[in-house]
Image (cartoon, rainbow, N blue to C red):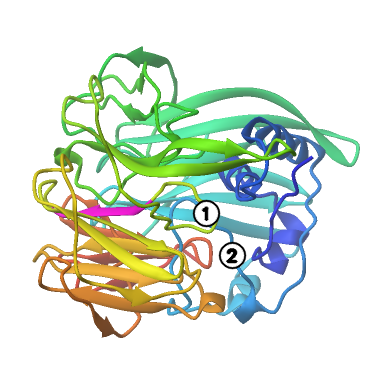
Amino acid sequence: MPELDFSGLDSAAQAAFKPHFADVVHRARRRRRTRIGAAVVTAVAVLASGGVAVAQLPARHALPPADDPKPTPEFLPVPDPSASARAQAPGRQIKYGPMQAGDLDRLYVRYNDCQDGDCALGVAVSADRGHTWQRVPLPVPVNSLVVLHATGPRSLVAQAHTQTRLGDGFQPGESFWLTSVDGGLTWRRAELRQVPALPANARVPDRMPGPDLDALITVDPSTGDVLQLARRSTLRFARFVDSIPADAGLWVSGYTGATYGSDGGALPTGSAVEVSRDGGRSWQRYAFPEQLVSNDDDFGGPAIASHNGQTGYAVGRVGGTLRIYRSVDGGRSWQRTAATAQVGERRIAAAVRSDGTLVVQAGLDANENPVMFTSTDRGNSLQPTTIGPGASAVPVPGGYAQSGWPQSSASWLSADGNDWSHVTPPD
């Protein structure tokens, strides 16, 4: 049975909260020498039992899991936990998930409101960049597990998994979809409709499991239905690229194959990227001439970044050396640039600012001793720069958003990918 890696969860979460489904599934998948199916089954079993074993590590040196969305290093301001505790009633605790940005103003964050061991679920909604918040209960039973994604300024999707208390554990129940098309103020159960192609310019969330196991989805803002591609990605250990603007098509990073050891564990081979410009109806694949790795769990192949869908970058490491490939034709062909750096086994993130500057970060948490580079000459050279937000930025209407998850439920927002403001959930 694969081992679950829960390192990096804070001690308060250990005491009162179960991690939501996407977190557990992804952590179960981080151990690359395990079978995918067994990992997911094990994750669900842990959820059902209600038990989580977490190693107690020093806060500054805990190695957080590579959650979804991508993490931000410890330059994030850390709120005073005692202030939050003082604001809550005795026996009551509120825990937030990762913040989602519909655009630069509309922000959403899932919360668990727990009292005496039972947790009600809701979404905190802000339409003014976090200056004011409104809490909206979700129509799910207490103790449900909910994964939230924004698919537009006012459209959201939540995947819910119910569970009922059974002695000291929980019995899993049904799974269903909820959607909102009015900025999170009202919610309804939604149908999942498989379609041959997603609508043009659809904003697609990066979810776990990846698109090779669970096809890409979005929300139809006119009906509130969940639309899912009928076709899954043909890449292995794939990950949807959310650092590409929605109008630049659908991009998936992954691998072309795998090798299997005597223990049945799989190791990915053949880094590749697939691009669709017709909503996922057809795809064009490019396999890189060397194996580019961006993550310690080998999911997602190289880090892909573009600000216009035409000039794009694939960034990863070969051994301990950083490599950059550039495409000037929307991912149809790629050429390696001259830029390089020694990054060891650090995880890699990359994004492109609105002015075309490439931002690369090697190391996604303090334990990796992260370093950051920029390139203003289309990836031909790299200049070291001060660590800050930007390398894990996701394009949203009006600019960029970068989540602080899992170190924080806060987010960073920027109109140009250069100057950033920090937004925290409500107290």
Residue 140 visible, this angle = no
Residue 139 occupies which quadrant of the picture?
Answer: top right
The residue at the point 19 percent across, 73 percent down is 418
Between residues 358 and 292, which one lies in front from this camera angle? 292
Q: Position of residue 386 (x, y in %)?
A: 31, 85
* Disc 1 crowd, CA 10 A, few/some/many (<14, 14-19, 20+): many
Q: Where is mark 1, residue-wise?
A: 67
Residue 133 visible, this angle = yes
The residue at the point 58 percent across, 48 percent down is 23
Q: Which mark is residue 64?
A: 2
Label 2 SS: loop
Q: Position of residue 264 (x, y in %)?
A: 70, 35
Residue 10 painted magenta:
no
Residue 306 painted magenta:
yes
Label 1 SS: loop
Between residues 127 and 209, which one lies in front from this camera angle? 209
Q: Which mark is residue 309?
A: none
